[in-house]
Amino acid sequence: MAYYDQHFYRRTVALQVSLLILSTMSVVLRYLARRKRKAQLKGDDLWAFLSMLLYWLYIGFGFYGLLNGGGLPATVLPPSVFEHALKASYAAGMLSLATFAAAKLSVLLLYRRLFLVDRWFRTASTVMLVVTIMWFLASVLSYAFQCTPVDKAWQPLKDGHCFKLKTYLLAEEIPNCILDIVIVFLPLGVIRKLQLPTIQKINLCFIFALGGFVSFISVTRMRLTRNELSYEDLASSGEWLTIQIGFAVICCCLPTYRPLLPSSQKFTSKLIAAYSSLQSLVTRHPNRSMGTPVGNSSATKLGAESSRHNAYQGLGEESTVNTLCARAEDRSTEGLHPMHSINVTKSVDMV
C-alpha cells in the first residue's frame, strides 16, 4: 500500500518528470552539437553524460520515497514505510552531491579545453578542479557518516546521535554556492581578452552567467534553514533541490549549443548575395537607360560587404579565435615588449 498526499504527489511528479526531460534533452543536444561539428567527445562531454545518469538515479530514488510517505508527516506513517522513505532520502542525498560534482567538473573541463592558452586561467582552473573534488569528498563523507551508527540515518529510534540537520545543510550548501559563483565568473577575464566584437563578448558572458541561476536556487534553499526546519520546510527544500540539480545539468551543457543555432551572419550574407544577384539581373535588362550598367557599382559594394560578412560568419563554429595572451597594461607609458604583440590562436568550438 502506498502512503502519500495526493496533491503533493502530483505536484512533485510533475516537477520531477519536467526536469528529467529538460535535463536529458540538454545532454542530447550537446551530443548532437558535437556530432554536427564531427568532433570527438571530450572529457567534459563524458562528465555531462554522467551527471545526467546520476540525475536519473536521483529522480528514481526520489520517486520511490514519494510513494513511501510523500507529503505526509512521520507521525501518520507505519515505521516500516517511514524507514523506506528515509533510506530513499539517504540515497538521493548522496546522488545529489555526485550530480553536482559531475556538472561542475564538466564545466571546468570545458573551460580548460577552450581557454587553456591563458596561463593564469590554466592555473586557476586547475585549482578549482582540485577544490571541487575536495568539496565533493568532504561532503560525501560528512553525509555518509552524519549519524553514529550510520543506520540511525534511516532508523531514527535507534540509540546514537546525528548532526543537526540545519547545521549540516548550511555547511554543505554554502561552499557549494560559493563554488558555483566562482565557476561562473572564472572565464570572464579570458573572454574580455578575446579579439571578438563587443556584442559577441557580451553574448559569451551571458551564456556563462546563466550558470548563476543554480546559485540563486542554492540561496533560496539556504533561506529555508534560517529557522528550525519544519516538515513543510523539508518538503519545500527537497523540491528546490530537485530544481537545483536539474538546472546544474542543463547549465553545464548550454555553452556547447552554438553549432545548432542559426548564424545571423550567414543569413545576412545570403541576403546580400541574393540582392546582389537580383541587381545584376536588373542591370542586364534590355530596358536599362543609357546603356549604362547602373547596378555594377551597387553590386560591387554589396559584394564587398558580403565578403566582409563572410569573414566573420565562421566565428563560433570551426573558426579560429585569436586570443591575446599578453598585453601591456599601459602601452603609452611603457615600451612594448616583443611578447606583448604575439597573438596565439586557439580553436574555439563552443559558441
Image: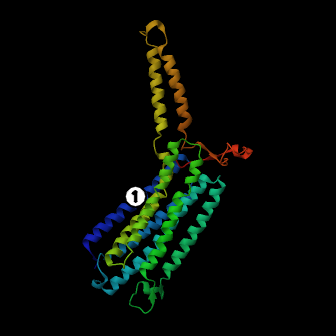
* Left or right of 125, for residue 244: left
- In depth, the one of 186 and 294 nearer the eye is 186
| Residue 315 rendering spot, x and y as whole percentages | 55, 41
**Relative to residue 146, is residue 326 depicted above or below?**
above
Q: Is residue 346 left or right of residue 76?
A: right
What is the secondary structure assignment of the residue under circle 1? Answer: helix
Query: Is residue 31 in view from this perspective?
Result: no
Vertical placement of residue 164 versus 11, above or below: below
- Residue 56 picture quarter: bottom left
Q: Amino acid at mark 1?
A: Leu
What residue does disc 1 label?
22
* Residue farthest along the left direction in this orientation: 6
Residue 45: x and y in percent read 54, 57
Q: Identify which residue is drawn at 48% across, 82% down.
A: 146
Residue 320: quadrant of the picture: top right
> Where does the image place residue 193, in percent across and percent down from the top left?
60, 48
State the image quarter where residue 337 is shown. Answer: top right
Q: Residue at x 25, y 70 (%)?
A: 7
* Whether residue 108 is visible: yes
Dot 1 alpha-carbon crowd within 10 angstroms: few under 14, some 14 to 19, many 20 or more? some
